[in-house]
Image (cartoon, rainbow, N blue to C red):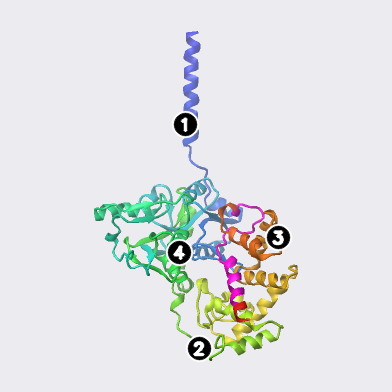
Amino acid sequence: MKYLKLFSFFFICLLFIGCKIEKSSPKPKFDLDKIQLKGKITVLIDNSSLSFFELRGKNMGFEYEILDSFAKSIGLRLEVKVIQNQKDFLRCLNNGEGDIIACNQAITLSAKKNIDFSIPFYKTHQVLIQRKNVDSLLLKEAANLANKEVYITKDSPFEARLKQLSDEIGDEINCRYIESSPSIEDLVEMVASGKINYTVANENLARISNDLHANLYTKTVISAQQKIAFGLRNNNPKLKQRLNQFLRLYCVSPQFAFLKHRYFDYMDIDPIIQIAPTTKGNISPFDQLFKNAAKKYGWDWKIIAAISCKESNFNPNARGLGGAFGLMQFMPNTGAHYGVYPNSSPEVQINGAMVMINKVYNSWSSIPDPEQRLKFTLGSYNAGKGHIDDAQRLAIKNGLNPQIWDGNVQLMVKKLADPTYYRDAVVRCGAYRGPASVYATAVYQKYMSWK
């Protein structure tokens, strides 16, 4: 009996040790050789205006476009896996769900304990996001953050910086969190709408947000300059070496300079087209051009005028996110398809848009009501038809009418920004953050006000 107890004790010890060894064993390697066998490289990416988003059916994003070029350079397809929660990046990387992290990540000593980094491809700094039209709340120095409430994502680099800054200024900065764990871009939008007063973002994302929300003030710097890089597993030396080789050449190339210009400096382009003053009684300086283009297809010219008003406020020199340009805000690839380029005349821009709008309208022949069909067309012009198709499928699944925009498909377009629906099998792509749900209604209302 004594020996039996002793044997049982040793057996349990061995079992415990075995379990400990198994638990602490290193993760299997997924280095470049195994990645190449799959024929694709998977990026774990943030869904934001800086990292990755879809605009009018096209995948875009500063970091996405860099990695897409890298994947092509090594003969692989780039697969995108959108990550909603910051803490999921490391887990998904280490269990092999992705190969590279792209979330505007700064290289820090604390981050280097868990992941490896590529060489940096951009430098930025952290800034305070606040509203410029509230003088009593506007802070122009980091020291003035003492005793203020700043909403941030928990366990983010911004939280670490604010705690460090509290120590530097000798006063408490009150970090606040929202239970739903919104993205940085969502927090920026909450500041713009007045729901919260302060948040923090990297300056490169803040610069884009500043163009999207004219009431934001983003010039209060709260950190030193930081190096932005891609995250990698610690046991992927071959992938790191190949990515670094690519970045060393790419970051000094004209292609990269143009990419930075498109995402960060697009508002600085000099005008190429002179805008005539609006004649009294007219909607815009281009009324006759709208009338001529619409007449060819039997359209009411005020519809295309309303689109132009919403897109560019009738500015043929307007530049938008990701390279959108002109009166009708064509994306470069789409514009070229319709013979429209950044230096095209207003007449060419308007004619190209009319052809595109008429084509999209005809594609919605399944919508019997002309008013609803027009709203589906306007939503598709903004988001791309694929996303509106997704919204229709979601409408059916949720017991709504897929042929009615207002209160039905419109609501499902909003749901496409809900992380719950990203995992839904009926959704084609989980990276849409566009405003098509409000865009279509706004353009339609503008048109009706002129009719």
Closer to the chain start, of discs 2 and 4, is 4
Residue type for callout 1: Lys
Q: Is 61 placed above or below 345 here? A: above
Residue type for callout 2: Ile
Q: Is residue 445 magenta?
A: yes
- What is the magenta range? 421-446
- Give the labeled residue for mark 1: 20
- Residue 170 at x, y percent in the picture: 24, 53
Residue type for callout 4: Ser
Q: CA distance from mark 2 to mark 1?
A: 73 Å
The answer to whether mark 4 and mark 3 are in CB contact below 8 A is no
Q: Is 75 placed above or below 317 here? A: above
Q: Residue furthest top?
A: 1
Element under disc 2? loop
- Residue 403 at x, y percent in the picture: 71, 64
- Residue 196 at x, y percent in the picture: 41, 59
- Give the labeled residue for mark 2: 275
Q: Is 2 placed above or below 104 here? A: above
